[in-house]
Image (cartoon, rainbow, N blue to C red):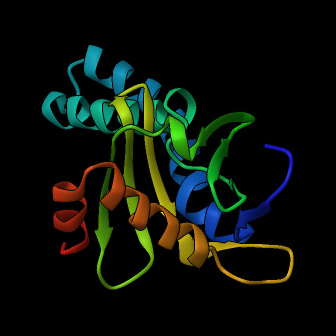
Amino acid sequence: MEKGVTYTYDRRRYTIDVLLATYVSVVGLPLAVVLLSLGVLAPLMLLLAVVCGYSLLNAFVAHAYPRKVTFDGSSVAFESFGHVDSYPAGSIERLRVQRYPDCMRLYLRVNNASPLRGRYFLHCEDLYDPEGNNAGPVYDFLLKLAGEASPAQGKASRGR
């Protein structure tokens, strides 16, 4: 996807929302495993290890928190930690969207999403193009595409 508008997550918000949680998990997971193996607060350390592992899986393996979204009107690409997933509109056969009604946030599952790929948490109100406009066109495009890809699901997902 060469042309289009690239929306970048607000630097401060991305640091707080994604990077801070990810780096805490980088430290927390080994610490929790060591303390778990020593038997220190075992149930709590097991819970901490699971939460940290899930956070790291989403950030580094699934690339679920895009730092940049490129949109050209008919296709969308998500970039996270140097990894890019691109979806031309015709390649999206199934799009499940959960939207948060009080803001422009979406949880997307594209095609045959699994825990390792095809899942994205988008904060469209915190993504900005070079002119300072938020990612409202991406938000609208994805909601419209969800309705077209699966009309019954699309209506249900918008009502959430």
Q: Quadrant of the N terminus?
A: top right
Residue sitting nearer the eye, 79 or 158: 158
Residue drawn at the location 28% of the way across and 31% of the way down:
50
Residue drawn at the location 16% of the way across and 57% of the way down:
152
Q: Position of residue 85 (x, y in %)?
A: 62, 35
Residue 14 found in image quarter: bottom right
The relative height of residue 102 versus residue 53 in the rendered view (above or below) is: below
Residue drawn at the location 22% of the way across and 28% of the way down:
46
The residue most toward the top is: 37
Q: Position of residue 156 (x, y in %)?
A: 16, 65
Count all numbered tags in the image, as a single digit.
0
**86 left or right of 106 in image:** right
The relative height of residue 136 versus residue 48 in the rendered view (above or below) is: below
Residue 114 found in image quarter: top left
Residue sitting nearer the eye, 89 or 67: 89
Residue sitting nearer the eye, 38 or 134: 134
Residue sitting nearer the eye, 40 or 131: 131
Residue drawn at the location 32% of the way across and 68% of the way down:
99
Residue 2 found in image quarter: top right
Q: Quadrant of the C terminus?
A: bottom left
The relative height of residue 71 versus residue 65 in the rendered view (above or below) is: below
**60 left or right of 31 in image:** right
Q: Position of residue 45 (x, y in %)?
A: 25, 32
Q: Position of residue 139 (x, y in %)?
A: 50, 70
